[in-house]
Image (cartoon, rainbow, N blue to C red):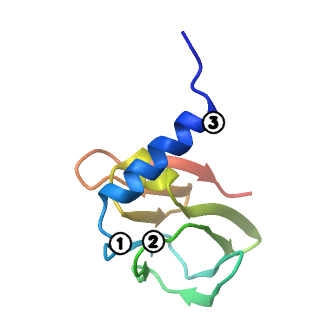
Amino acid sequence: MATVGIPVVLLLMTMLAISIPSTMAAGFSVTNYCEKPINMTCASRNDNLGTSLLHVGESREWEFGGWAWTKFWCDFRKDAKQLHQDTWTWPLSFLREHKTHIKWLVKEAGIYMDHEIDPEEFFKGWN
């Protein structure tokens, strides 16, 4: 099987960027399904989305107008446990999930991606 070179990958990414309207919003949400509130801090290299206490059943959502050519991550704390998760990486999030909004579910076992129709996908457990 032949490997794809970097120029081909860049060409495909450029074609993808041209084919999707620049007005399309991208984003992610986080919902707390733990038995207790969790602390959450989300950021990117350029933007601090803030720290908040996410109560049981509560959600936070972020949308980015146009393209979010960046990586966002969230750090979660519950009691003495911690968890770090990349929550949005353009274009990888779009290419992998074929959608512009990723839904994350924080549970007692760790963090899951909500596929809405398919079963949730376990990503990472608490440290």
Disc 3 versus disc 2: distance between alpha carbons? Answer: 22 Å
Q: Quadrant of the N terminus?
A: top right
The location of residue 50, given as percent across then percent down, is 63, 90
Amino acid at dot 3: Ile
Of 71 and 81, nearer the camera is 71
The one nearer the camera, 110 or 18, is 18
Q: Earlier in the sequence, mark 3 or mark 1?
A: 3
Left or right of 126? Residue 112 is left
What amino acid is at disc 1? Ser
Q: Secondary structure at mark 1?
A: loop
Q: In this rendering, is residue 63 above or below 107?
A: below
Residue drawn at 31 percent across, 61 percent down: 20
Pointers 2 and 1 in contact (CB under 8 A)?
Answer: yes
Q: Can you tell which mark lies on residue 6? A: 3
- Spatial CA distance of label 2 from label 1 is 6 Å
Q: Is residue 56 left or right of residue 50?
A: left
Helix, strand or loop at disc 2? loop
Q: Which residue is mark 2?
A: 67
Q: Earlier in the sequence, mark 3 or mark 2?
A: 3
Q: Quadrant of residue 126?
A: bottom right
Label of residue 22 in the image: 1
Residue at the outermost left position? 117
Q: Residue at x 72, y 75 (%)?
A: 45
In which quarter of the view is residue 18 placed? bottom left
